[in-house]
Image (tube, coloured by chain):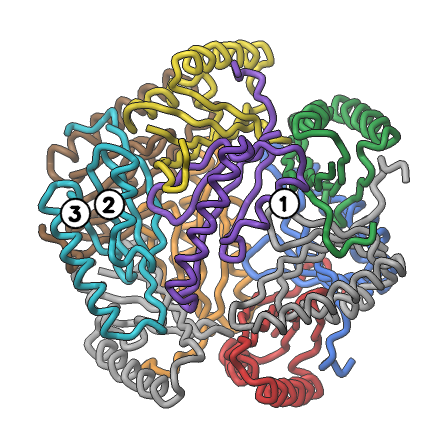
Chain colours: A brown, B cyan, D orange, E red, F blue, H purple, I green, J yellow
Amino acid sequence: MLYLVHMVVDIPATVPADEAARIKAEEKAYSQALQRSGKWPHLWRVVGEYANYSVFDVASNDELHDTLSQLPLFPFMKITVTPLAKHPSSIV
Amino acid sequence: MLYLVHMVVDIPATVPADEAARIKAEEKAYSQALQRSGKWPHLWRVVGEYANYSVFDVASNDELHDTLSQLPLFPFMKITVTPLAKHPSSIV
Amino acid sequence: MLYLVHMVVDIPATVPADEAARIKAEEKAYSQALQRSGKWPHLWRVVGEYANYSVFDVASNDELHDTLSQLPLFPFMKITVTPLAKHPSSIV
Amino acid sequence: MLYLVHMVVDIPATVPADEAARIKAEEKAYSQALQRSGKWPHLWRVVGEYANYSVFDVASNDELHDTLSQLPLFPFMKITVTPLAKHPSSIV
Amino acid sequence: MLYLVHMVVDIPATVPADEAARIKAEEKAYSQALQRSGKWPHLWRVVGEYANYSVFDVASNDELHDTLSQLPLFPFMKITVTPLAKHPSSIV
Amino acid sequence: MLYLVHMVVDIPATVPADEAARIKAEEKAYSQALQRSGKWPHLWRVVGEYANYSVFDVASNDELHDTLSQLPLFPFMKITVTPLAKHPSSIV
Amino acid sequence: MLYLVHMVVDIPATVPADEAARIKAEEKAYSQALQRSGKWPHLWRVVGEYANYSVFDVASNDELHDTLSQLPLFPFMKITVTPLAKHPSSIV
Amino acid sequence: MLYLVHMVVDIPATVPADEAARIKAEEKAYSQALQRSGKWPHLWRVVGEYANYSVFDVASNDELHDTLSQLPLFPFMKITVTPLAKHPSSIV
Amino acid sequence: MLYLVHMVVDIPATVPADEAARIKAEEKAYSQALQRSGKWPHLWRVVGEYANYSVFDVASNDELHDTLSQLPLFPFMKITVTPLAKHPSSIV
Amino acid sequence: MLYLVHMVVDIPATVPADEAARIKAEEKAYSQALQRSGKWPHLWRVVGEYANYSVFDVASNDELHDTLSQLPLFPFMKITVTPLAKHPSSIV
């Protein structure tokens, strides 16, 4: 099942630089594992913003929430989830 | 080059039903030709809305505008375009 | 799987009264059948508005979209869908 | 009497981790007691957000405010309350 | 129980003048009866707008919805309801 | 002359607890004196929020500003003022 | 007493041109009489919009509402009223 | 003097096609004359929208309003004007 | 040339009280010099807010930006500028 | 390819003055190099705000994101990107 997820990241200046770098590295590893699993098929950078649009392919709302809430950067993110369905004109 | 495009469709009640059906059929044909060409790789229905999120893969802003403005439903659409770039964590 | 769905209804004055009444009757029958099936477990009126908050229990995003888009009042509705997950403090 | 309540939680980074954990534990106990009492019949997690939608069943506006304002996390919450009424199509 | 209700009225130009006048007269009579009953204790005009702020004193959410939805001008109103509670500093 | 005033209070976590308590006590005394004077006839708590709706009855815009800007909690408030007039249907 | 008033005019295309011209002429005469009386000391056009910012100097909220609601263009206006007070740095 | 002007065009479906075409032709001629005069140095299409961003170079606010309000499409436009100044880092 | 300028002031609690007082005194002197020069003809307090509406009369956009950006409180202000033109009904 | 970019700068008070000055100097050098290269053809100050509107001329979305995300002030900016296309009435 597909979901469009918009993530805007805002790490407060009060978070020490090394800690921020550590969390970002964890985020990258976590994300790439999910991408390889097929659960995170699309991850695009929004031009000009520390934000991304992603598409997740998971079995349920609960699985999506577990996946997102375990993102290392989750505490610093504003996330919006839009459930997607098959479009009647889609050839896929 | 990738763009995320959000299209919300609102056909006024004053448009006769048969004309609306004709335009929708043209829209489907136009869209499926673009999808087969690879320029419109993703087309998803937003659950609960007469709206879609799409991803276009075109060579320039101008090509994207020409493509969108020739959508048969264009006069009845509110369109928002978000330019996308490669995400540093993306494995694609 | 649960979704919170907010529906705001706005039937234009140009729709003849008898036609509006017919559509509303169809809507009631359609809704009550879904409620009896267990797919529409909650339907509440928003005080002071021609709007409701509902909870749907369906198997997928696609099933939810099919269910909502076949609401007789769908063309006159602004719908917002919020996917829900189990809350860690919920005793249910 | 039913109310839909939307709670968005934002605990500032300046709150020490152990204190935050203590408050969250109190919140869980407080919430589960109310759920068992029947005053808080529904508590759902909003997918992707540190937020919930809840339904409260209490006798008055004043009782609802007392209940909400004594939530341990109340100082860190943005709360929106929507009073609900019986929907004419509801079979409950 | 008290509720603050904000009503913004917008009668489309397509409604014939005499019909609009009839509905407004019914609205005035309906409102004044409720005011005399004590259920509508405050009714103020918002300066510069065809809108009012009112305070209703009714027994439940359901009673408030029934009261508001039977306003003759209800089909032409955008209504927002804010439930009120006793303020700890109020001397009333 | 009547004004509807919406006050949303947000005391930053950086303000020491005892200082916050002192300011709140001053606010209560200041407010109750004005209520007894008849200048602040209505003060209601917005359910679920650290906010209130109030009605002030003062002689001028300037008097209202002086009154509001001397609220002890003024530096921590977001205030919106709506001037009110007599409603043609009001029986008061 | 001073008020800043923002008026945005939107005359629907369904209003016949000659009727619109008549109403605009009445509006000009009504406005210029009030300007000469000193009650409407400032009237400025918002660049690029069929809108104005005005300052009214009247004795009360009620007088302002009567003045504004009798504007010939009132039914076609979205009006926002901001009550003004003397600024402590003003040399006037 | 420079102004950034955002124009969103919305021609209602009730305007006959030939009349709309006539107005658009007048708009093009009017705009191109101003461009040649140097008063309208930049005119860009917003991708995916019947809208443009323009830069005007005129002597005053009044001249800008006269210029914009005489656009043939002015009655069908929502215009936002942002006055611009020289940026301290600009090399022009 | 006239501009309506809305200034909302928000001095963070982290700014020491004496420094804030110093800046406010500088602001008052700066503002009163401009008022005496005729460039700042109107300065009004927005009732209930630490904000003002002002009218500036300057020769150009650049002069206005220089004037505003040198306000001592500029770093703590959210400023919105609306260019004004002569209204066709104005008798001034 | 052209993009309109709106940048609003907000450097928190917690950033030491000398560090802020250093970053601003780097920003100016970085920007002027890009302007000389022709990739940043327009840079205008928004009157009254610590913000600018710019036009970038680059080969792709990715190039724009790389360019913007390497702005020294990027961590303190809210950036909005609007892709532009050739306007059918443009004489350029």
Residue H65: numbered disc? 1
Q: Which chain's residue wears label 1?
A: H
Q: Give the amino acid type for the residue marked by disc 1 in the picture.
A: His
In the image, E88: left or right of F40? left
Q: Give the amino acid type for the residue marked by disc 2 in the picture.
A: Thr
Q: Indicate the secondary structure of the residue bearing disc 3.
A: loop
Give the quadrant of residue B10.
Answer: bottom left
Q: Indicate the secondary structure of the residue bearing disc 1.
A: helix
Residue drawn at x 48%, y 14% is J27
Residue drawn at x 17%, y 52% is B31
In front here: D24 or D60?
D60
In front here: B59 or F78?
B59
- Label 2 neighbourhood size at 10 Å, few (<14), some (14-19), many (20+)? some
Residue drawn at x 69%, y 43% is I84
Quadrant where the C terminus of chain D is found in the figure: bottom left
Q: Nearer the viewer, mark 2 or mark 1?
A: 1
Q: Nearer the viewer, mark 2 or mark 3?
A: 2
What residue is disc 3 on? A58
* Residue J36 seen by the camera: yes
In the image, B65: left or right of B22? right
User: Where in the figure is residue F2, as x and y percent of width and height?
Assistant: 78, 65
What residue is disc 2 on? B67
Q: Which chain's residue wears label 3?
A: A
User: Where in the figure is residue E46, as x and y percent of width and height?
Assistant: 69, 66
- Label 3 neighbourhood size at 10 Å, few (<14), some (14-19), many (20+)? some
In front here: F57 or B49?
B49
